[in-house]
Amino acid sequence: TSFPTTDGKLDLLLYPNPADSYVNILLPESSDISVFNAIGQLVYQINSQQHVYIDTHSWANGFYIAKSDFGAKGFIVQW
């Protein structure tokens, strides 16, 4: 499964946004995934995955960025 964008490139899919207790990240192919908080600290990392379920219930409210080989997306954790 691929996730084309309007410019034809493959992209990552992230939901729900805002997240409360979890976030799903889907990629068109396996890729390393890193998540950073708003001040650039690495808060989560996993290697070579295509679908990742991340438990965010213990994370602080705020803005996060998920990065992979297929781009980056911002998301909010909000209780």
Image (cartoon, rainbow, N blue to C red):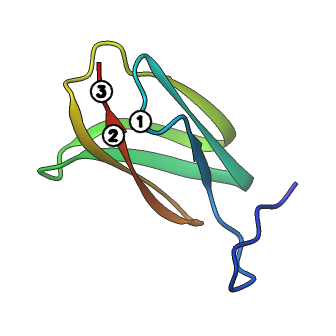
- Give the structural element (helix, strand or loop) at label 2: strand
Residue placed under numbered mark 2 in the picture: 76
CA–CA distance between discs 1 and 2?
Answer: 5 Å
| Residue 9, x across and y down, in percent | 70, 79
CA–CA distance between discs 1 and 3?
Answer: 6 Å
| Residue at 61% over, 33% down | 52
Residue 35, placed above or below residue 31:
above
- Give the structural element (helix, strand or loop) at label 3: loop
Q: Which mark is residue 18?
A: 1
Q: Earlier in the sequence, mark 1 or mark 2?
A: 1
Looking at the picture, which amino acid does disc 3 mark? Gln
Residue placed under numbered mark 3 in the picture: 78
Q: Give neighbour class at mark 1: few <14, some 14-19, many 20+ (Cα, 10 Å).
A: some
The residue sitting at the right extreme is 1
| Residue 4, x across and y down, in percent | 76, 70
| Residue at 59% over, 66% down | 70
| Residue 27, x across and y down, in percent | 69, 52
Tell me if label 3 and label 2 are in contact, CB under 8 Å.
yes
Q: Give neighbour class at mark 2: few <14, some 14-19, many 20+ (Cα, 10 Å).
A: some
Tell me if label 1 and label 3 are in contact, CB under 8 Å.
yes
Quadrant in the rendering for residue 20: top left
Looking at the picture, which amino acid does disc 1 mark? Pro
